[in-house]
Image (spheres, rainbow, N blue to C red):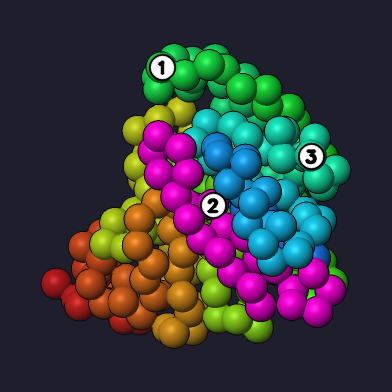
Amino acid sequence: MIRETFPVGLLGCNCTILGDETSREAIVIDPGSEVPRIVALLKKHELTVKRIVITHAHIDHIASAQSLKQITGAPIFYNKQDLPLVALMSAQAKWLGIAEPTVLPPDHSPLHQETISINGIDATVLHTPGHTEGSLCLLIPAENLLIAGDTLFAGSIGRTDLPGGSAPVLLESIREQLLPLPGETVVVPGHGAETTIEQEGRTNPFLVTDPTNRFGILP
C-alpha cells in the first residue's frame, strides 16, 4: 500500500493519502488545506481518488474537502453528527482568522463498523465520539494501521472544550474502540508524530491509570 502522511494548514493537520499499488485507486483523509500539494502527490503516485474521508468537522480537517471533490469527483464521507460544527464554520474561520471555506453536508455518513472500500484497500470505520460528536477513526486491518483523527495522539488525547466535546465520552471511545486493537497497530493522529496502540496504553498519561486498560500501569 502507498501511504503519504503530511501536515497541512495553519494547525498542521495530518492529511493522509492511502493508495493501492495495483489499482492506483486512493482514499484521501482530512484534506484540511494545501490542495495543490495533495494533487501533486496523487500525480506523483499516479493515483485516482475514489473516496474523501473526514475524521471530524473541525475546519483544519475539512476546509479543503469540497475543493478536492471538485477536482477529483470523489464523494466526501463524514459523520452527519458533526453537521452542527459545519453550521459553525464561520465562527471556526474567525477563530483562526481565515476566510470561511465552503463546507457541505457529506455525500455519505458512514456507520460504526462500516467498511469503506476502494479496489485493493478496505478500511473499517470506528465511531469515536468525544472530541466531537461525529468523530471517527479509520482502521486498515491488513496494514495494522489506524488513522485516528483527533481522538488519540502520541502522549495525549483530543481536546474536549469545544462544541460537541466530552472528556468522559472521549475516554470511553478510546477504551472501548482503540485500546483493544493489536498493540502493534500504528496510530496516525490528526496532528503530530505517529505512535502505536501499545505505546499509548503503556505511557499516555490520560490512559495509564485506567484499570480497564490492558496495557496500563494501575495506581
Q: Nearer the viewer, residue 29 or 140?
A: 29
Residue shown at 84%/74% (left/top)? 23
**Counting other residues with Cα less than 10 Å from the Cα at mark 3, is it few (<14), some (14-19), or many (20 or more)?**
few
Q: Quick check: can you spot residue 103?
A: yes
SS at badge 2:
strand
Q: Which residue is mark 1?
A: 97
In-front residue for pair 197/70: 70
Residue 109: image quadrant is top right
Tell me residue 17's x, y (percent): 62, 60
Mark nearer the N terminus (2 vs 1): 2
Q: What amino acid is at disc 2?
A: Cys
Q: Which residue is mark 3?
A: 71
Give how far across and how far down residue 202 sits, in percent: 26, 77
> Which quadrant holds the N terminus?
bottom right
Q: Which span of residues is magenta-colored?
A: 1-24
The answer to whether the residues at label 3 and label 1 have Cβ atoms under 8 Å apart is: no
Amino acid on which the number 1 mark rests in the picture: Gly
Q: Is residue 68 left or right of residue 10?
A: right
User: Residue 77 location, x and y as percent?
Assistant: 74, 46
Q: Is residue 172 visible?
A: no
Question: At 39% from the left edge and 75% from the top edge, which residue is drawn?
Answer: 196
Label 3 residue SS: helix
- Cα separation between marks 3 and 1: 26 Å
Q: Is residue 18 magenta?
A: yes
Q: Which mark is residue 70?
A: none
In this rendering, which labeled residue sits more in front, label 3 or label 1?
A: 3
